[in-house]
Image: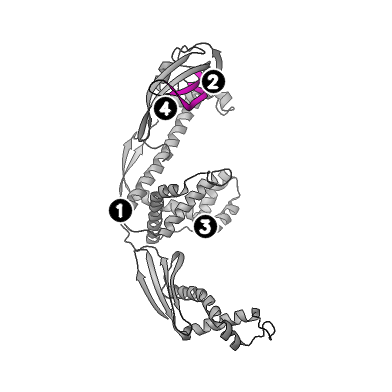
Amino acid sequence: MEVTINNVTDCDREVEISLSLEELVPYFEAAYKKAAPSIEIKGFRKGKVPMSLIKRMYGDSIEYDALDDIANDSFKKTMEERNIQPIGTPNLVDMKYKRGEPFTFKIKYEVKPDFELKDYKGIEVEKKIHRITEKETAAEIERLRNINASYEEAKKVDGTEFMVTADLQDLDESGTPLIGKKSDGVKIYLNEPGTEKEIKQALAHAELGGVYAAKFTHQHDDHSHNVHLQITVRKIEKVILPEFNDEFVKKNTKGKYSSSTDFQKAIHEDLQRYWNEQTEDQFVNDLTREIVRRHDFAVPETLVSGFIDSYIEDAKNQQSNKKLPKNFDEKKYRESLRPTAVWQTKWALIREQILNNEKIEVSDAEIEAMAEKESAKLGIDKERLVQFYKSSEASRERMVNEKLIELLKKSAVVKEVENADIPAEA
């Protein structure tokens, strides 16, 4: 068997394999024996046709039908002999065969790229620290009060603690209503920070049945557009906020807290805990992004497509019918996901090399320690957890990843930045 392997790109390979007639004979003989029992020829019982007659009458088709299996078997042996591990599905791109002559074929396949592992320790990374302020704690308390607010109908707005239900009609520049641009029964809370100030101003002294106008420019991420609204007031309600006291706390925490002071402190601690988690997540993201940025290499399309496919499946699973919405542009969505998928592929390959380089593994002792730690929290017997963790590849992978991230964090050069902006979902 003659084998020639060509490097098409850093990840793409093309192997050309040629088998002599002598090498093909065992494959063909096996194909004849497999086909013989099903062949029927007049004058012979089924399965009793002489092999010489089978070869003469059906040899061409039997041999051609066997070529795919021969190519697959020869390719597999070639990869095993050279310790090559293709990824994805190899693709037969060319095949040449004439009965009685050698068989030559080409197969394209992908491999993981060979790249040099750059420095991944001692990397300088900013860690954005967010300290919860009393203002943020007060805002959370205010949110809880709003959730538990009661409403009293009124005829006129007299302050900011009012809920206005109105019909909104979009107008053009000349003040003419735009067809199809009307929303009925929209609730507008005048003390909501996100409500446009022009709407608040227009409704500052609104009366039941009144019609008011508001003009403003609405900003959408990277673009903006002018808005001209006609607001017809259908209902006015005074928002009555409950007092934040011990009684309020007992009721809304179902007795977990009895003191408003203690509950306020717990709120502050919960908010700080949340932002600490966001800080850590963002820190790890920034650290891994920097590691990936330092590595420039091509990635296999098979792995990139695999990540994109998983994102598509996630999108489907979020739908009640497990299907993408009608008229959903999947092609465009896949293109938008590509940069993320390429990054994930790079990180997966770099991570694999770091794990090998650091010889990071999970021992039985570590599994038992994890089971003991989580047993009480999950309410599951420790021994059952130990057996589960030992048999679960996903659990081992999680523990390995935690050890890797801890190693990277400890080796990083951290510069803390106080009260920096952190994305709400790091």
Residue 127 at what x, y percent from top left?
Answer: 34, 41
Please name whichever residue, 129 or 246, is drawn nearer the observer in this view of the structure.
129
Residue at the spot 38% in from the left edge and 46% down from the top edge: 285
As helix, strand or loop, the secondary structure at mark 2 comes to loop
How many C-alpha atoms fall within 10 Å of the one at disc 1: few (<14), some, or many (≥20)?
Answer: few
As helix, strand or loop, the secondary structure at mark 4 comes to helix
Please name whichever residue, 82 or 421, is drawn nearer the observer in this view of the structure.
82
Marked residue nearer the N-terminal end (3 or 4): 4
In the displayed structure image, the side of residue 320 where residue 182 appears, left or right: left
Q: Is residue 328 visible?
A: yes
Q: Quadrant of residue 391?
A: bottom right
128 lies above or below 54: above
Q: Would you name the residue on which mark 4 appears?
A: 136
| C-alpha gap between disc 3 and disc 1 | 30 Å
As helix, strand or loop, the secondary structure at mark 1 comes to loop
As helix, strand or loop, the secondary structure at mark 3 comes to helix
Say if mark 2 contacts mark 1, CB within 8 Å: no
Q: Would you name the residue on which mark 3 appears?
A: 393
